[in-house]
């Protein structure tokens, strides 16, 4: 199941188990948060009702983006300004969409039929 949520003035398409980076939200690492501003939800090509639907997420970390250098110059006027900026953001892991929860164990397709055939002499 997927959903489109709005936070920080942007829209994100999420599914259970996804990790996303959003604008800074209040909360400590390890705390949980829920989004009620859901624009769209569905499974496959079918759309689901949004009544009472919430998206739950866990805050993984509060971090900063890479530094951006802002340099202004007006030639022949001895005007130069150099400034740096690091935007703060929050890294989230989507734990559930409505009643659909994320699988805690990742699927490993290599272990399903990875038995090598025995060498025949």
Image (cartoon, rainbow, N blue to C red):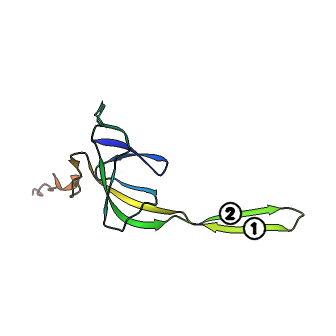
Q: Which residue is mark 1?
A: 81
- Against 79, is 111 above or below? above
Q: Is residue 24 above or below residue 47?
A: below
Q: Is residue 79 left or right of residue 91?
A: right
Task: State the SS at label 2.
Answer: strand
Image location of residue 92, percent across then percent down = 37, 58
Which quadrant of the figure contains the N terminus? top left
Distance between mark 2 and mark 1 Cα atoms: 8 Å
Judged from this view, the residue extending furthest toward the right is 76
The percent position of residue 58, horizontal first and vertical second, equals 31, 60
Which residue is located at x 29 percent, y 46 percent?
54
Could you say which is closer to the camera, residue 104 or residue 28? 28
Left or right: 70 as drawn, with respect to 67: right
In this view, the residue in front, 98 or 21, is: 98
Residue corresponding to mark 2: 70
| Mark 2 / mark 1, whichever is N-terminal | 2
Please report contact status of discs 2 and 1: CB closer than 8 Å, yes or no: yes
Q: Quadrant of residue 87?
A: bottom right
Query: Where, by quadrant of the figure, is residue 57 drawn?
Result: bottom left
At label 1, counting other C-alpha atoms closer than 10 Å, the crowd grade (few under 14, some 14-19, many 20 or more) is few
Q: Is residue 32 left or right of residue 65?
A: left
């Amino acid at each position: 199941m997927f959903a489109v949520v709005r936070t920080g003035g942007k829209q994100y398409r999420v599914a259970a188990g996804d990790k996303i980076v959003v604008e800074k939200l209040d909360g400590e690492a390890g705390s949980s948060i829920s989004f009620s501003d859901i624009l769209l939800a569905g499974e496959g090509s079918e759309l689901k009702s949004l009544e009472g639907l919430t998206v739950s997420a866990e805050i993984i970390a509060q971090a900063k983006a890479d530094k951006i250098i802002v340099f202004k110059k007006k030639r022949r006027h001895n005007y130069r300004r150099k400034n740096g900026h690091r935007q703060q953001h929050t890294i989230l892991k989507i734990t559930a969409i409505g009643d659909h929860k994320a699988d805690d164990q990742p699927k490993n397709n290599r272990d399903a039929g990875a038995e090598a055939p025995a060498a025949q002499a």
